[in-house]
Image (cartoon, helix red, strand yellow):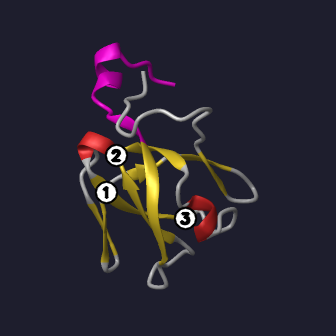
Amino acid sequence: METITWSDFEKVLIVAGTVTRVEPFPEARKPAWKVWADFGPYGEKKTSAQITALYAAEDLVGRQIVGVINFPEKQIGPFRSEFLLTGFPTGEGVVVTAIERPVPNGTRLA
């Protein structure tokens, strides 16, 4: 495992957001949702997330999530992903990173 410095960590903008909309993504190679999230002062951003095994669309809307919002945008088929939804892969599917209690959208992980 390579160690990093505090300044390396500070380069990654990991923030809280609230899921505002979820839609099917039938064009994706692996089952995925199109997910939009409100990141407060950073605005609303969208992503493709392979989390369909454990989460229905209605389970996600209104949920606070943790996203990395300063990666370059990525084209995924006909969809442009603007952030990385964080989670932990398991044998059953990806478990979305949870926030223990509400924080303002856009709050940065420290």
Residue type pointed to by label 3: Gln
Label 2 or label 3, whichever lies nearer to me, is: 2
Q: Are marks 2 and 3 in contact (CB under 8 Å)?
A: no
Q: CA distance from mark 1 to mark 2?
A: 7 Å
N-term mark: 1 or 3: 1
Q: Is residue 99 above or below residue 21?
A: above
**Residue 24, position as x, y percentages in the image:** 50, 79
Q: Earlier in the sequence, mark 1 or mark 2?
A: 2
What's the residue type where badge 2 is placed? Phe
The part of the image, by quadrant, that contains residue 106 is top left
Q: For mark 3, what is the residue?
A: 50
What segment is highlighted magenta in the picture? 1-16
**What residue lies at 44% left-to-right and 18% top-to-bottom?**
3
Q: From this viewpoint, which residue is outermost toward the top?
A: 6
Q: Which residue is mark 2?
A: 39
Q: Is residue 49 magenta?
A: no
Quadrant where the C terminus lies? top left
Residue at the spot x=55%, y=64% of the render? Answer: 50
Measured along the vertical axis of the image, is residue 76 above or below residue 41? below
Magenta-colored stretch includes residue 2: yes
Secondary structure of the residue carrying tag 1 is strand
How crowded is the residue under tag 3: few (<14 C-alpha within 10 Å), some, or many (20+)? some
Pointer 2: residues within 10 angstroms few (<14), some, or many (20+)?
many
Tell which residue pokes out farthest to the right in this image.
92
Identified at 58% across, 69% down, the residue is 57
Residue on which disc 1 sits = 45
Are circles 1 and 2 on residues that touch, CB within 8 Å?
yes
x and y percent of residue 8 in the render? 31, 23
Estimate the x, y position of residue 96 in percent, counting from the top left. Answer: 59, 49
In this rendering, position of residue 82 left or right of residue 88: left
Secondary-structure class at tag 2: loop
